[in-house]
Image (spheres, rainbow, N blue to C red):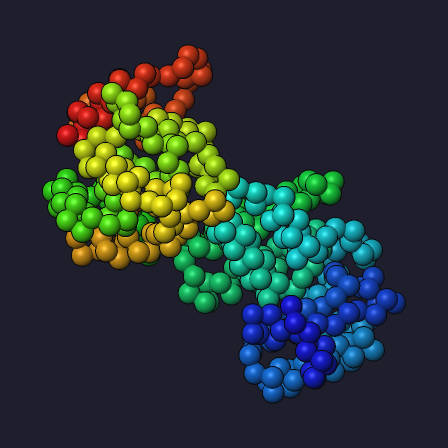
Amino acid sequence: MLNTSEIPYVYTRDGYYYFNRRVPMDLQGHYRCPRIIVSLRTKSAQAANTKSVTLASQLDEEWLTLRWRQKDNPLGRFLISNDEHSYAPSDAPLLSEAKSIYVTVKSDGRSLAFSQAADRAVSNLIDAVGDKPIDRYSRKDVNLLRDQLFDRGLSKTSIKRLFGTIRAMVNFVGREHGLPVSNTFSGIYLGEDTHRAETRRLPIPLSDIRFVQKQCEQVNDECRWLIALISDTGMRLSEAAGLHKEAVVLDNEYPHIVLKPHPWRRLKNMSSERTVPLVGVALWAAKRAIQSTSTDFLFPRYCDETICKSNSASATLNKWLSSRVSDGGVIHSFRHSFRDRLRAVECPQDITDRLGGWAVGGVGEGYGSGYPIEVLYKWMDKALS
């Protein structure tokens, strides 16, 4: 945040101007938060100055005639409405403070996308209704943000994900501060969405997989090794891109990968921690990657000791795949194909779940050490050869 001394009550963030004015102490009991922050939605200093003067004038007038509380005033959303019983200032942290707490505590071991999602969600809510204590947001505030997001063309899935981020943040920080459970961000109506069918990711046909694998062997570079490895293991992109040399066991009768969580790359869930046999082009790709890397990571272009850049990898790999696979297939489609290839050889479901890192159920799954590598290898070789 960069304060702008040339324009009163204004600071800049990411190039945009924001109006920022503290509520006088004698009036704070009438407001949801001690400071009013409004996005001016401009990068122009001249436009920001005009809007700032206008908002400041409106506030001055409102403070003189506070008892009238004009509802059509754009600043009125910061006021406590008549149907709210308490006029006492809140002791809860502001949303911006809650975000800092949440990201600091929960981001350990997570990718950069985690903090970026929190920043994006909080910025949208603050721009829409202001930076308030987390227990002062109302359903009206939530619906206003929802409508603004739809107006900007965001999809139902994106809006649902954004509110999920806010809900997780508010609930976590609320528990940490001993606040009552809030349902403000739960059960938000996003429409029936009957006018559009749900997008379903289709598997890549086996003929396309074979074609892509041959192309990978011909190009023979880091990106193609990563694609080939995923195509015959069914691993998630982040799992493969974040591989360390120590995870790859080649000096064994049954070459395999031992997938475990690391500081630079977490796994999706407990079932994701598993042993993945290396057969077909996946074995070739793993060998080439280990022989060629000058670091401890198989794919140093996308991973180091601090971060796994799976989003960057996804964009690059999907662009290359787009003209080589049908039905809009992407890198994650190999995972759908992997499941189908195991079904085709009638692989037992519990072994399929183990190989792909899908959640397994039943009390018995918690007993014993799991399947030996030779059994996993047998089914992987049968399905993919």
Is residue 211 visible in this depiction of the protein? Answer: yes
142 on left or right of 113: right
Image coordinates for residue 289, horizontal then vertical, percent? 29, 42
22 on left or right of 363: right
Image coordinates for residue 109, horizontal then vertical, percent? 53, 41
Q: Is residue 46 above or below residue 193?
A: below
Q: Nearer the viewer, residue 146 or 339?
A: 339
Q: Which of the image's four quarters has the N terminus?
A: bottom right
Residue shown at 43% from the left, 13% from the top = 367
Q: Which of the image's four quarters has the C terminus?
A: top left
Is residue 188 visible in this depiction of the protein? Answer: no
Image coordinates for residue 334, horizontal then vertical, percent? 25, 41
Q: Is residue 7 above or below residue 14?
A: below
Residue shown at 74% from the left, 66% from the top = 35
Q: Nearer the viewer, residue 356 or 148?
A: 356
Image coordinates for residue 241, horizontal then vertical, percent? 36, 44
Q: Is residue 384 above or below residue 182?
A: above
Q: Which residue, as the protein is rendered here, is positioned at the far right?
A: 26
75 on left or right of 339: right
Question: How many numbered circles does the render carry?
Answer: 0
Q: Nearer the viewer, residue 146 or 217?
A: 217
Residue shown at 70% from the left, 72% from the top = 20
Residue shown at 83% from the left, 70% from the top = 24
Q: Is residue 134 above or below residue 81?
A: above
